Image (cartoon, rainbow, N blue to C red):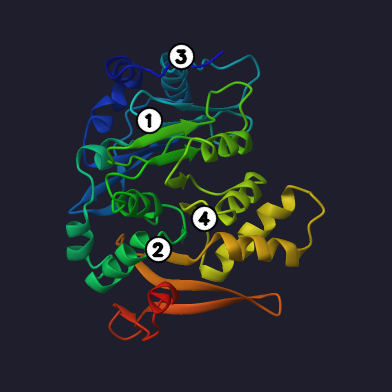
Amino acid sequence: MDATPAAPGTLLTALGPLAALYDDPAVSSIMVDAPDRVYVERSVDHVTRLEEVPAPFTGPDDVRAVIDAVLAAAGRPLAQGQLVAEARLADDSRFLAVLPPAAVAGPCFVLRSTRPWREHPIEWENLLDLGSVTQEALDLLRSAVQAQINLLIAGGTASGKTTLANRIAELIPADRRLVVIEAAVELYIRHPRTVRLTAEDADGVSYAGLLHTASCLRPDWLIIGELTGPAALVAMQILGHGHTGLTTIHATGTENALARIESYCLMANLGLGLGDIRNIVASALRLIIFHERLPTGRRRITEIVELAGLEHDRYVLRPLMRCDAESGRLVATGARPGWEAQG
């Protein structure tokens, strides 16, 4: 049975002593590691930092009470013996809780709020001011979107992949039809012709099956949520068969992103060899953008690479922009994008 997300007022009641933190538009995440250890991710001038806050709990029972209340409000009450629970809340925020004995030090949870970037989204102007992207890089991304180039955004946890995906998708002309497909709702794209699909809470609907459905909804662009598991092979096949798209992946670099896609494709266990998979990936993706979170909390694009096909079963990677080691700025390599050269 599908869950009914909690209404905001109900959720604030369920959060009890944490309601004020959740209601703070600068707080993007609340992490309760133990009754006496509570942390938040707080954004100041679009720079996110982790900070410890006073813990409002007297013991593990207080933490468990909040977990039970939030899950109940979200229509996801814990079943007997259940130790891990996840829920999507009314504003698409995410809640993940772990109970003992799986949680060694007592019940813990993370609440990732969508409120900051929904109510105060980071715009291109902010990204330019912060140095997260340069004007030259933005022009390159616009060129890729206009040429209907398939894009992959790679980066680590909280590196800004989702924010960048949202902004790039909004560069797509307003008269184009976007179909957004996600395993779990995370993207928030302000585009007038957007159809959103998710396999989350959809009983009997697989993510791979939903990808096939999305490709049949006459999309001009497919915006695919983070690649993971064997469904990545379906995504690569669809993008390689003529659909234009944008997707993301958790990775530590450009080559690592491609290796992770290969691993996910192998999970599909269709008997394909590595060479076959590389052919599929090379036909599906053209531009890879690596986004990194620095120790200071700032986020920025550090590399833009064109995937220019295969040569002797190896990817041909043409760096278009790289982060200069001395200045720390993203600079052009001098290589011209293949789609512009063809034009």
The residue type indicated by label 2 comes to: His
- Front disc: 1 or 3: 1
Residue with the mark numbered 2:
291
Are dots 2 and 3 in contact, CB under 8 Å? no
Badge 2 or badge 4: first in the primary sequence: 4
Residue with the mark numbered 4:
250
The residue type indicated by label 1 comes to: Asp
Residue with the mark numbered 3:
72
Q: CA distance from mark 1 to mark 4?
A: 20 Å
Identify the mark at residue 92; answer none if there is no mark.
1
Badge 4 or badge 3: first in the primary sequence: 3
Identify the secondary structure beneath mark 3.
Answer: helix
- Disc tally is 4
Look at 50% across and 66% down and name the residue there: 286
Where, by quadrant of the figure, is residue 58 drawn? top left
Look at 31% across and 41% down and name the residue there: 28
Direction from residue 271 to residue 110 in the image, left or right? left
Q: Nearer the viewer, residue 223 or 303?
A: 223
Q: Nearer the viewer, residue 112 or 213?
A: 213
